[in-house]
Image: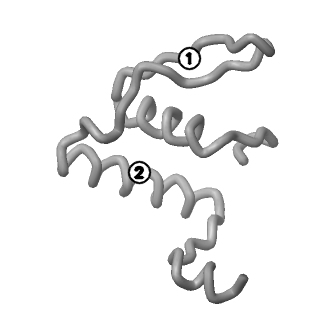
Amino acid sequence: MTDGRRHTAEVWKTLFMHACGHAVQFETGLNGQPFPTGFRSSQLTKSQMGELIEFIYSFGAEKGVVWTEPEAQERAA
């Protein structure tokens, strides 16, 4: 959540890719809600993906996100 808004994982990915300078596009769905189109993080180079991941961690740290590893989440469930 940022600024009181909740986003899907796909929207978060698009927001971060846009923040890192990658071209992304949003369309309006049939329900009037925006959704991301026209991006593929799988097409990023290793360097670009590394920059994207570092940006995500930096943004999260600024917002007080407590990061956990997937294995730790599975054990806690």
Placement of the C terminus among the 4 image quadrants: bottom right
Crowding at dot 1, Cα within 10 Å, few <14 / some 14-19 / many 20+, comes out as some
Q: Nearer the viewer, residue 35 or 19?
A: 35
Few, some or many residues within 10 Å of mark 2 (<14, 14–19, 20+): some
Report the residue at 28% width, 48% height from top.
Answer: 49
Percent of width and height locating residue 63: 64, 57
| Residue ID for mark 1 | 26
Q: Residue 42 at x, y = what percent? A: 30, 41
Q: Is residue 31 left or right of residue 76?
A: right
Expressed as whole percent of the image width and height from the top left, the position of residue 7 reads 69, 40
Q: CA distance from mark 2 to mark 1?
A: 21 Å
Answer with the quarter of the image where residue 75 lies. Answer: bottom right
Amino acid type, mark 1 = Phe
User: Mark on residue 55?
Assistant: 2
Q: Is residue 56 left or right of residue 53?
A: right
Where does the image place residue 67, in percent across and percent down from the top left? Answer: 56, 72
Taking depth in this image into account, of 23 and 27 the one nearest to the observer is 27
Between discs 2 and 1, the one toward the N terminus: 1
